[in-house]
Image (cartoon, rainbow, N blue to C red):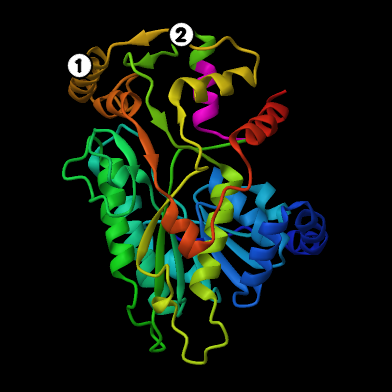
Amino acid sequence: MSATVTSSSASTATKATYSTSEFNQLLPQEQAALTALKQNVSHAFVTGAGGFLGEAICKRLIAAGINVTGFARGDYPRLNAMGVNMVKGDIADEQALLNAMQGCDLVFHVASKAGVWGCKQSYYSPNVNGARFIISACKHANIAHLVYTSTPSVTFAGIDENGNDESAPYAANFLNFYGESKAIAEKMMLAANGDLLSNGKQLGTTALRPHLIWGPNDPHLVPRVLERAVKGRLKLVGKQDKLVDTIYVGNAAYAHILAAVALSNNNGEQDFSPSQTACAGKAYYLSNDEPITMAAMLNKILACKDLPPVTKRVPTQLAYVAGCILESVYGLLGKQDEPIMTRFVARQLSTSHYFDISAAKHDLGYSALVSIDEGMAELKRSLN
């Protein structure tokens, strides 16, 4: 599939005005990080630019006056209007990526196929092959800075994760192809740190693992929760409320900017190599650093639309058995749509998922800028 440039002179013309107004609306810490990034980077390439997190990253880069080329499968006029040079293409098309990445000096590889259902190839093609092609294109295009959006699912083995840090091993067995494919891709990304570019310099890579991204304009978690609540199908799994980490979309975007700053900050060193920075070759858990029960989180989302709290519960084992049965039936029938329950979802909703983000604080200088309650206030305004 060939890449198609969908930018226009109109988008370039609106860029300066947009940058000034939007930059002033960012939090001081975001302004400082973007100012530091702009000293070392002039043109960022963002895969999945049309997605929830990708757009949030693009918005901040453009606001700072950093040139952005976005790569996505669909058409996104609002990103063109924002000033992003959009290129339409397939992440599994190596040549299309290489063509689109020419002239860039930083890559945010955000695009991936997420989900809990589907065949192996549907996840491996974009997630594994896509990551491999991004690495290859960086080498050929002499792009030394690569920030990869991973997921905590790479270490989830179906049991409680109580304050795990990055020393936790990759899962030995995965309950879906999403976590499996992302684990393979993350390993490739980190192993590529220090690889030689065509110009003889070294590639610097880092991986970020944000957990449960949410916020205004969320196309995933929030609408699904609200829809199921309205239909009376929203239920908690298990008798015990377990703690989970989440992350507000603005905080996730901020962390990606900080990772890019850490990879590109040469501190005035002439022999600087991104592959030798503190975050290079490492993965980091990210969250709001406010563990909360799943029931409390869901009820906060429901309150944003003045919906009653969730009270119905399903026993953990019953949910898991139902997931096994539904997966078998859907597989036999060749159904492509996602079952209402799967083994992964049953385990995900009945176990704890909160993480020690000390490494991100230390190496990236990250801390959440927007609290859960502050983010919920923004979410409520966007829904009403």
| Residue type (three-letter) at the residue carrying disc 1 | Val
Whether the magenta-drawn stretch holds residue 21 is answered as no
In the rendered view, would you say 90 is above or below 355?
A: below
Q: Quarter of the image for the N terminus: give it.
A: bottom left
Residue 222's x, y, as percent? 54, 27
Residue 33's x, y, as percent? 64, 64
Number of dots carrying numbers = 2
Q: Nearer the viewer, mark 2 or mark 1?
A: 2
The residue pinned by badge 2 equals 311
Near-viewer residue (35 or 65): 35
Residue drawn at the location 25% of the way across and 45% of the way down: 180
The residue pinned by badge 1 equals 321
| Residue type (three-letter) at the residue carrying disc 2 | Thr
Crowding at mark 1 (Cα within 10 Å: few <14, some 14-19, many 20+): some
Distance, label 2 to label 1, CA atoms, is 21 Å
Q: Which residues are magenta?
A: 216-227
Evaluate whether residue 216 shows in this view: no
User: In the figure, is residue 361 to the left or right of 8?
Assistant: left
The kind of secondary structure element at disc 2 is: loop
Residue drawn at the location 48% of the way across and 15% of the way down: 228
